[in-house]
Image (cartoon, rainbow, N blue to C red):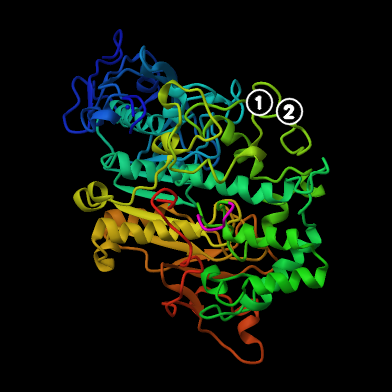
Amino acid sequence: MNRMLRGAAAAGTALALMIFVPGTTVRATGGKPPSAETCAALASAELVITDEAARGDVDQGAVLAKRIRPSITSARLVPATGAVPEYCRVEGTIPTGDTQEGVNQVRFGVNLPTQWNGRFVMIGDGGHDGAVSTSTARVPEGYATANSDMGHDARVFPGATFAFNNRPREIDYGWRATHVATVVAKGIIDTYYDRRPSYSYWDGCSTGGRQAAVEAQRFPDDFDGIVSGDPFMNTIEIAMEQVWSSAIFFRDVNNDGVGFDNNISQADIDALRDAVLAKCDVLGNDRIRDGVVGNPLACAKVFTEKDVDDLGAARGLSPGQIQAIKDVYRGPHDSSGKRRWYKGKPLGSEFSWGSLVVPTPANGNFPGQGGFSMEFVNFLWFEHDPGVPTARRNDPTLLPGPGEYRWLDFDFDRNTPQGRTVNGSKGPWTPNDGGAFMRAILNGSETDLRPLLVKRKAKYLLYHGFADGLIGPEPTIDYYEDIVKNTFKGNSKAAKEQVRLIMVPGMGHCAGGIHGAAVGWDKLPPLVDWVEKGKAPESIVVTQDAGTTAPGGNQRIICPWPKEPTYVGASGSGAENDPANWVAANFECVRPRPHRDRHDDDDHGDDHHHR
């Protein structure tokens, strides 16, 4: 693989600065306390920041500048408003790439509270990003915060179009932008306060969770603690799963030119949801009837494909429709059914299928996950882009014209996640190309994290909604268990000192979820307590959030995997099912009985295992 793809003095009277991050001291900082004057002075600062990571891995370092020279485009003191205290808002750009690779820039923003608590938190992104967050989250708590656009402007390049035949922007989106924005933010913090952060944290979900996993594997010196939620870390495989689970319902299998031959209705989805809950709402350590599948892995032992057959027969579904439902749960595989590329949607996520997965009148025949995956395969999955999407991505009758590629034509026999590019770096694309090239740029799925967790002793807090219908939760459990195996040689006692996984029953993608479910919690404080006080999270109280609010409200606790929240309060005469009794004090974290993975019999050869 070629070098670009792996892995990259204040002006005037204001400030004179050379920053080295990490390792050496700041030279000529001026040392003035935060003020309107020192904030405004940042606007004319010419910073030169040394990136020690550029001296490390040969391939990765080849696409990183050893000295980063950001351009500060604005710096202004924002007065206190309501709960948000006074802070200095700094914005700018960072040049990336070179003449051989091609050049690009990363936009960033940094918030510097006047009353600083000495900590820094980098805020993760979502989706394809392309914007710099203006959020003041964490500023009221005294944190300095930062965010980037991941190397492109969504106003110019909507969706994934930024990546069309543009390797520098792909590398920035994959990993480089996050790292260089972190290094620059630390440099600006050092300049403004005349000292470095005492502790640095990452907090992100979805794409922000992928960024977290990529940082964990590539840049172990960037953060003392990392929160990674519902991570999009197995990027190439997750895109395959999303294409798979929606294409099942779109395809024209009868060759009548209409499509949607195996589609199901919202009523069918609701009946499926109810059938799953009938068997799995109360199961094992989940002792209350609350409309939530407490553990989809345990549910898979009692809700089987026979139950799908029975549901289909009762509702008059065709064999193709019945198989489509089974295939959503099973995940993408080849035409023989023997080579499975990734795990499918979890049992208990059916409540979201009508918005995220299945084309329905309510979503305009454009399921939510299609906004991401239906163009991801055009611009980010292959080394050489196969073509732009068709004009109507949700129209299975519209065949691709010259220069176009249709997501429905993605081939699960030939387009394998670790398959090579047939024509190599010169191209062009062929229908037999695999995803290995972009997988090396985008995925954050490495599980030997010894530099971060053993050498640096950083803390890594993972979480995932057990009802996430967008990015399935089971691979995150696999990821965690592989970290225990590959970083700690299977020593779970040693592992839990550095890494923990929290599974959240009833939570959808990052937040919200099943109506009435208690899924809301602040992720950063448990990580801070763990990093700074050595107090690892043994249980966390959760309440309803804005997406699950129901009259009366309720609480639960969530637990480090493999423990599960278990009701231990009053029981009998339906007391356990009374929401008035669903308070944190009535739950304990209990280890489940050993269960067998529902996919243990599937083929996981080296070319298609999700790691």
Residue bounds of the magenta highlight: 335-339
In which quadrant of the rendered image does the N terminus lie? top left
- Residue 391, numbered circle: 2
Question: Quick one: label 2, few (<14), some, or many (20+) residues within 10 Å?
Answer: few
Sequence-wise, the earlier of marks 1 and 2 is: 2
Q: Is residue 315 magenta?
A: no
Q: Is residue 439 above or below residue 539?
A: above
Could you say where residue 566 lies in the image, as x and y percent from the top left? 50, 78
Could you say where residue 288 lies in the image, as x and y percent from the top left? 60, 79
Question: Quick one: label 1, few (<14), some, or many (20+) residues within 10 Å?
Answer: some
Image-based side of 327 in relation to 394, left or right? left
- Residue 379, numbered circle: none
Q: Label 1 vs label 2: CA separation?
A: 9 Å
Q: Amino acid at mark 1?
A: Glu
Mark 2 residue element: loop
Could you say where residue 197 lies in the image, as x and y percent from the top left? 28, 38
- The residue at the far bottom in this view is 572
Residue 88 visible, this orientation: no
The residue that mark 1 highlights is 404
**Residue beneath the point at 49% across and 21% down:** 166
Q: Is residue 337 magenta?
A: yes
Looking at the picture, tell me which residue is in the foreground, 246 or 214: 246
Number of numbered tags placed on the structure image: 2
The image quadrant of residue 256 is top right
Q: Nearer the viewer, mark 1 or mark 2?
A: 1
Looking at the picture, tell me which residue is in the foreground, 387 or 181: 387
Q: Is residue 420 above or below residue 447?
A: above
**Residue beneath the point at 64% across and 78% down:** 279
Could you say where residue 19 lies in the image, as x and y percent from the top left? 23, 24
Q: Amino acid at mark 2?
A: Ala
